[in-house]
Image (cartoon, coloured by chain):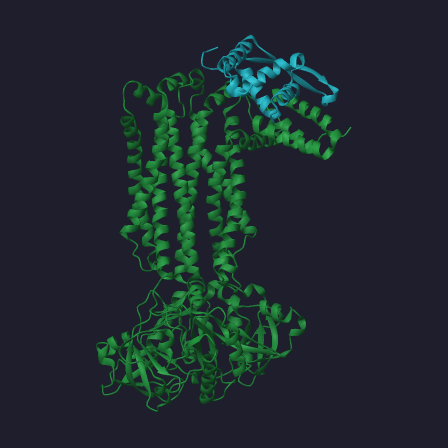
């Protein structure tokens, strides 16, 4: 991955969301993970748009799941983080952690 | 379980990229299934919101090329797919699509509005039978607007007998009358006709019959025919109206028919009642020229034949009756000329030209946007072609997208035209403008333009695409098959066209607007603010002799003077600068009578005329109350009279005049006591003409206006109406209002035309600037890598800017020269409609030039700066 193309904040959230959702990482669980953990009102479409972009960058990959009845017989698209994606999100998180070290008092965390 | 809403699901299924559609739809269904437990309405709302959101974020994005229709598909489904593809443009490239739609809507909207006018003026079938075989005698004379004067009844008798080119000739005169039906008495507009006018025009009755020549016999029973609108308004469209007797000006008349509604066209729309003239025309005064003649051409005769005969007869009458007919000329005009003045056609042609150019400008803009887009999509198109799409398919898709833009633009245009018409109706109450409407023909016109213009603006880019080397484009993305030299030339042409059209439109718009401003702001020579006017018409049936009529007016003036808030009040036979004074010949006492007898418009008023109007006295004095009581009649002349007949303003004072009597009355000897400053000619294009003011007591006039000077114009109306009623219940305060409003009404069509030109000029400027910006932004974006290289190699921002902006400036300069030349040519055709400004007015051309060049430079400068701000390294990497 070329230097300088660090993940954007929302991209990081989406990659982390995919990791949180584990095996069953399709739109709804990823969206719900971000929604519940950050308390932000995030749109499902924005999550998909970001996933699509991350996939074209090679940071996540997707495959077609089996169609299920409760979804009107529609298939899920299941996402997984690629090693490159893992590196990128790790770099982002590390950068954030390192930048916040020693600032507990200021940030009130 | 409650199913999710179907419509958004179907939309999504079609518009989302295929690899995501299933997954997104499945997610929406899943969330819906959970949320529907808390209430279906909320769940449906949430579903819609997410669906719209998904369309917004994901719709139309096609990272994987969609399959093309194969030759085996039924043509209809191919066409439908094309069109759907076209609509998808609004999601995939909203900026381009909406910019094009707004541009097109403005231009087609302007054209639609003007078409609505032309439709009423030119294309609507006239209610007249065989209008091409009608000839209209148009009369011009001293103190009368050109072509807009009529003939007197003795003149009509002469024309009727001596013009072989007419098989029949009739006259009509517009007069107001008081119609009483039971207890209700009201003012109506009446056409009095002689010579079987209904027959000559070929009018039809929808109830009863039209008027016939037999109704004109002196001993025929008095009858009247109603117009359709008056029949509806006053009689509720009841058949029982036929055969009833009403009182017109106090005399009973039987209603014998109702004219068909198509007759209500142009100025005829205001007429309410038609009656026959039952007198002997040759015995009427030659000075009363209110009659408008129309003739039906004899078989084989042409308008030119009639014109020659009428002009010759007018010359003969001028020689035979020099007192009344000298300098009076007549010609025969066609129906078109007669129904709308010569200027109307100039204005219509000019408006049509302006909106036509506006449409060309809009197409040039969209064409440029389209070319830019196609170059951006060249690689995609190349891929598609390589994958087996025929070029025809690709071209069809572009045309389909353009048609979608045209359709949306057409809808927007109708909305804009409707808004424009609402504005027109708000500004002017002229019958012509009131007839404007968006009818089937107007909608068809807008639809036609919406269909044709997309073909027009998409054809050039498409042809270029067909010629371009697709394999080359695929092999090397940086090859600009349609962005090369030819396209550079194309864009240069676009810049020149845009600049020159903008200059032409600005010149025309500025001239029209400044001319209208001059008309609206024209100084008429006295204080019109704070002045009220109303008609005071005392017809013979109301007061038999002149003395009684005079007493009635004096009574009225006295009552109104007593109303609190009234500063001064007079009656006057004209509202200065708004209505014409009847031209009358006179002799100057002590001067040998010459063949050329002097003539002037004679104004009849009370001694307070100059107090009420505030028209200043330049020499001598104004009237005093004692002048009215004195048996020695006095007059105040206007400066033009003094200059023309006495050699100067002071010389006229104390001169003695003998003014010819009107309608068989004896002449009046007056002494000139003062000279007043001229007021503007009611026809603003003409210089002031000689006028003389005499007193009502000495030379009474039946038709006058009440003029009231007040500081409480808004609140006086009820008191004035009450005074009219108190004087005589049969005397309505007709057309009561402020003089300023009367002037505004008079210029409302001019103001409206000016506003239209201003609006079109503004739109033209907007489109030209946006278009130039589009061209420049595109050129600069194409050249960004080159600019970056140059700057990396040490070129300063200034050098680069000078090079790019300099090229635009040269093109804009060429456009400016062409535009100024075009504007000058078009302005020449405007000469007759311009007032107070010459078609070559240098300030107008300088302004238009500076504005357009300024806009062009700004349009070039903004993208240029953006390019220069780009980091050269970053830019090179992207390239």
**Residue B145 placement: quadrant:** bottom left
Tell me: B314 left or right of B293. Answer: left
**Residue B822: x percent and y percent?**
32, 46
Q: Nearer the viewer, residue B806 or B599?
A: B806
A98 or B105, which is in the foreground? Answer: A98
Check the image and report above or below for B512 versus A46. below
Q: Residue furthest top?
A: A83
Q: What percent of the width, then of the height, locates residue B207?
A: 63, 70
What's the residue at 51%, 72% (across, down)?
A: B717
Splitting the image into 4 quarters, where does residue B311 fall?
bottom left
* Chain B colour as displayed: green
Q: In the displayed structure, does residue B603 sit left or right of residue B97?
A: left
Instruction: Specify whether residue B290 is in view.
Output: no
Chain in cyan in the render: A
- Which quadrant would the C terminus of chain B be assigned to in this image? top left
Decide: is B643 above or below B26.
below
Q: Is residue B574 above or below residue B71?
A: below
Please tell me which residue is depicted at 54% across the width and 52% down the height of the picture.
B438
Q: Is B360 situated left or right of B835 in this image?
A: right
Pick the front one: B582 or B705 = B705
């Amino acid at each position: 991955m070329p230097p300088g193309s660090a993940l954007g904040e929302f991209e990081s959230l989406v990659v982390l969301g995919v990791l949180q959702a584990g095996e069953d990482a399709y739109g709804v669980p990823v969206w719900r993970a971000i929604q519940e953990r950050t308390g932000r009102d995030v749109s499902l479409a924005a999550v998909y748009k970001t996933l699509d972009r991350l996939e074209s960058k090679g940071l996540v990959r997707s495959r077609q799941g089996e169609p299920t009845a409760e979804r009107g017989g529609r298939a899920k698209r299941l996402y997984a983080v690629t090693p490159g994606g893992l590196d990128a999100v790790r770099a982002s998180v590390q950068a954030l952690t390192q930048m916040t070290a020693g600032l507990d008092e200021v940030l009130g965390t | 379980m409650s199913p999710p809403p179907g419509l958004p699901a179907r939309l999504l299924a079609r518009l989302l990229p295929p690899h995501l559609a299933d997954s997104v739809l499945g997610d929406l269904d899943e969330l819906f299934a959970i949320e529907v437990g808390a209430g279906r309405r909320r769940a449906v709302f949430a579903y819609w919101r997410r669906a719209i959101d998904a369309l917004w974020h994901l719709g139309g994005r096609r990272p994987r090329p969609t399959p093309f229709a194969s030759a085996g598909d039924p043509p209809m489904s191919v066409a439908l797919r094309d069109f759907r593809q076209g609509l998808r443009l609004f999601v995939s490239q909203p900026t381009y699509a909406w910019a094009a739609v707004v541009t097109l809507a403005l231009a087609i909207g302007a054209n639609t509005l003007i078409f609505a006018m032309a439709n009423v003026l030119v294309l609507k079938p006239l209610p007249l039978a065989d209008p091409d075989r009608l000839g209209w005698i148009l009369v011009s004379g001293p103190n009368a607007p050109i072509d807009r004067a009529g003939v007197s009844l003795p003149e009509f008798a002469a024309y009727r007998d001596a013009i072989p080119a007419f098989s029949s000739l009739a006259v009509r005169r517009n007069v107001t009358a008081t119609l009483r039906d039971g207890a209700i008495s009201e003012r109506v507009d009446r056409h009095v006709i002689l010579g079987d006018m209904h027959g000559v025009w070929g009018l039809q009755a929808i109830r009863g019959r039209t008027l016939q020549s037999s109704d004109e016999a002196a001993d025929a029973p008095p009858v009247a025919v109603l117009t359709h609108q008056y029949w509806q308004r006053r009689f509720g469209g009841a058949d029982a109206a036929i055969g009833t007797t009403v009182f017109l000006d106090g005399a009973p008349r039987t209603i014998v028919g109702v004219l068909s509604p198509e007759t209500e066209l142009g100025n005829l729309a205001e007429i309410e009642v038609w009656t026959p003239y039952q007198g002997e025309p040759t015995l009427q005064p030659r000075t009363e020229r209110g009659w408008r003649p129309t003739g039906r051409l004899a078989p084989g005769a042409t308008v030119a034949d009639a014109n020659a005969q009428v002009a010759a007869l007018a010359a003969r009458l001028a020689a035979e009756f020099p007192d009344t007919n000298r300098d009076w000329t007549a010609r025969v005009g066609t129906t078109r000329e007669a129904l709308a003045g010569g200027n109307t056609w100039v204005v219509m042609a000019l408006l049509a030209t302006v909106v036509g150019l506006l449409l060309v400008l809009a197409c040039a803009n969209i064409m440029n946007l389209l070319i830019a887009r196609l170059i951006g999509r060249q690689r995609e198109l190349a891929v598609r072609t390589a994958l087996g799409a025929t070029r025809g398919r690709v071209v069809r898709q572009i045309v389909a997208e353009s048609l979608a833009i045209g359709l949306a633009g057409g809808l927007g245009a109708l909305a804009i035209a409707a808004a424009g018409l609402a504005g027109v109706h708000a500004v002017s109450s002229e019958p012509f403008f009131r007839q404007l409407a968006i009818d089937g023909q107007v909608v068809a016109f807008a639809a036609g333009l919406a269909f044709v213009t997309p073909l027009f603006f998409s054809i050039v880019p498409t042809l270029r695409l067909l010629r371009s080397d697709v394999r080359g484009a695929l092999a090397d993305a940086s090859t600009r098959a349609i962005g090369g030299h030819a396209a550079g030339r194309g864009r240069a042409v676009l810049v020149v066209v845009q600049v020159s059209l903008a200059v032409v439109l600005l010149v025309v718009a500025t001239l029209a607007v400044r001319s209208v401003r001059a008309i609206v702001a024209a100084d008429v020579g006295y204080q019109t603010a704070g002045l009220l006017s109303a008609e005071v018409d005392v017809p013979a049936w109301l007061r038999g002799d002149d003395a009684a009529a005079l007493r009635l007016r004096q009574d009225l003036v006295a009552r109104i003077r007593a109303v609190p808030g009234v500063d001064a009040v007079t009656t006057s036979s004209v509202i200065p600068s708004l209505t014409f004074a009847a031209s009358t010949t006179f002799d100057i006492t002590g001067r040998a009578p010459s063949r050329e007898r002097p003539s002037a418009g004679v104004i009849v008023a009370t001694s307070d005329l100059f107090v009420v109007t505030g028209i200043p006295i330049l020499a001598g004095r104004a009237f005093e109350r004692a002048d009215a009581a004195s048996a020695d009649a006095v007059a105040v002349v206007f400066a033009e009279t003094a200059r023309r007949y006495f050699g100067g303003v002071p010389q006229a004072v104390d001169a003695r005049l003998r003014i010819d009597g009107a309608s068989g009355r004896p002449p009046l000897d007056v002494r000139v006591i003062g000279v007043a400053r001229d007021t503007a000619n009611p026809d603003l294009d003409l210089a002031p003409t000689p006028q003389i003011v005499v007193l009502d007591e000495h030379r009474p006039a039946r038709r006058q206006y009440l003029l009231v000077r007040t500081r409480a114009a808004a609140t006086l109306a009820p008191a004035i109406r009450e005074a009219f009623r108190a004087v005589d219940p049969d005397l309505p305060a007709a057309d009561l209002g402020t003089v300023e409003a009367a002037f505004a009404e008079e210029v409302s069509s001019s103001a409206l035309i000016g506003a239209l030109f201003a609006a079109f000029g503004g739109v033209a400027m907007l489109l030209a600037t946006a278009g130039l910006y589009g061209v420049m932004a595109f050129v600069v974006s194409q050249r960004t890598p080159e600019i970056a290289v140059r700057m990396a190699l040490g070129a300063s921002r200034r050098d680069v800017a000078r090079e790019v902006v300099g090229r635009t400036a040269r093109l804009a300069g060429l456009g400016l020269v062409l535009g100024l030349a075009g504007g000058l040519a078009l302005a020449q055709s405007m000469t007759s409609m311009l007032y107070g400004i010459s078609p070559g007015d240098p300030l107008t051309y300088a302004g238009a030039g500076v504005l357009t060049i300024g806009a062009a430079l700004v349009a070039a400068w903004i993208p240029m700066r953006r390019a220069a701000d780009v980091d050269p390294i970053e830019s090179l990497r992207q390239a």
